[in-house]
Image (cartoon, rainbow, N blue to C red):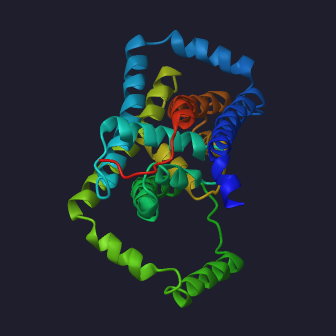
């Protein structure tokens, strides 16, 4: 059985790569073509409004889009350097290929496995852990700014405060108790020891890249509100954006549905300040295309060219 699998390994790998790429393309097409919040005709009309506006602001928006991914690539390059020095192009390839893979998996978990496969087998668990560190640092930025936005939102708008759900609280307590009881089996001690070996400067750089990246893509949203002529002050807009990202981050989803969730939350939030629903949905769609669709399409090239690491590389 092993010999048969080994013999057909290249064909199986090719099949998996084709499934990932065609799956990503299919999901992207379906979401754009069958969007109940924004039809393709409406999107075209909204884009014509966008391109008729200030060309310089559009260029700044594109620069912010590049900066968003450059910061993510540098963040991954910094983290991965603990196990293996990467060139910028290596980190670029791994980030985009993993994005393409993650787009069809719940909560982007495919990203962990995809990045790990670029490394030798014995390093893969550590690479997945480093990827988790990178994602947690990004979540830290989301929670930090999101808390500021949430305080502003609750303090300035008539929002019904959700009551504490006893059932959900019980589930949370149960999960924490299980983790505590089986902490040895989960190898948490090994994870803790490995994390302690990571230089503090790497943690600081990772957090720095995460906070900068958060501010960059938040300001992408703000620039789009200006381009679509939304008359709302900077402070209010940014706090609503912060609040939106915080709320979206706590809802598990397929990456491909991420923009739908953000769109629905954004519509609800900006409704409090009387902003047109169509404009907000268009902005979240454009954000999704710029930050996920285009990089994922580029990443499909790297997925198709991917080769399993058989030997250590330097």
Left or right, 14 with respect to 202, comes to: right
Is residue 272 in view from this perspective?
Answer: no
Q: Nearer the viewer, residue 289 or 278?
A: 289
Q: Quadrant of residue 25?
A: top right
Q: Residue at point 39% right, 43% down?
A: 72
Q: Quadrant of residue 282?
A: top right
Q: Nearer the viewer, residue 295 or 53?
A: 295
Q: Residue at point 44% right, 28% down?
A: 223
* Residue 71: x %, y % from top left: 34, 40
Number of numbered discs: 0
Q: Nearer the viewer, residue 222 or 290?
A: 290
Left or right, 256 with respect to 133, comes to: right
Residue at the farthest bottom position: 181
Q: Residue at point 28% right, 60% down?
A: 203
Residue at the farthest top position: 52
Above-or-below relation of 166 to 44? below
Q: Quadrant of the N terminus?
A: bottom right
* Residue 162: x %, y % from top left: 64, 66
* Residue 206: x %, y % from top left: 31, 54
Q: Residue at point 66% right, 15% down?
A: 44
Left or right, 183 with respect to 80, comes to: right
Left or right, 6 with respect to 116, comes to: right
Above-or-below relation of 188 to 240? below
Q: Quadrant of residue 38?
A: top right
Is residue 21 in view from this perspective?
Answer: yes
* Residue 24: x %, y % from top left: 66, 37
């Amino acid at each position: 059985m092993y010999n048969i699998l080994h013999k057909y390994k290249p064909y199986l790998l090719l099949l998996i790569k084709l499934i990932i790429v065609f799956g990503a393309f299919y999901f992207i097409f379906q979401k754009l073509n069958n969007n109940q919040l924004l039809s393709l005709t409406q999107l075209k009309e909204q884009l014509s409004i966008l391109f008729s506006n200030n060309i310089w602001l559009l260029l700044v928006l594109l620069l912010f889009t590049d900066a968003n991914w450059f910061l993510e690539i540098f963040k991954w390059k910094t983290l991965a350097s603990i196990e293996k020095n990467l060139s910028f192009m290596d980190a670029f390839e791994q980030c985009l290929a993993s994005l393409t893979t993650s787009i069809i998996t719940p909560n982007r978990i495919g990203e962990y496995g995809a990045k790990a496969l670029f490394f030798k087998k014995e390093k893969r668990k550590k690479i997945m852990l480093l990827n988790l560190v990178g994602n947690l640092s990004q979540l830290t930025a989301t929670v930090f700014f999101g808390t500021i936005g949430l305080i502003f939102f609750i303090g300035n708008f008539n929002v019904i405060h959700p009551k504490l759900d006893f059932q959900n609280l019980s589930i949370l307590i149960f999960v924490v108790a299980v983790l505590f009881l089986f902490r040895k089996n989960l190898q948490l001690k090994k994870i803790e020891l490995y994390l302690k070996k990571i230089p503090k400067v790497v943690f600081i750089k990772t957090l720095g890249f995460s906070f900068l990246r958060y501010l960059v893509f938040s300001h992408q949203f703000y620039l789009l509100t200006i381009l679509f002529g939304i008359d709302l002050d900077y402070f209010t807009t940014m706090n609503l954006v912060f609040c939106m990202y915080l709320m979206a981050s706590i809802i598990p989803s397929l990456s491909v549905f991420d923009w739908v969730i953000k769109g629905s939350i954004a519509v609800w939030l900006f409704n409090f300040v009387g902003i047109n629903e169509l404009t907000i949905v268009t902005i979240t769609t454009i954000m999704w295309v710029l930050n996920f669709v285009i990089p994922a399409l580029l990443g499909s090239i790297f997925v198709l060219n991917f080769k399993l690491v058989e030997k250590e590389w330097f």
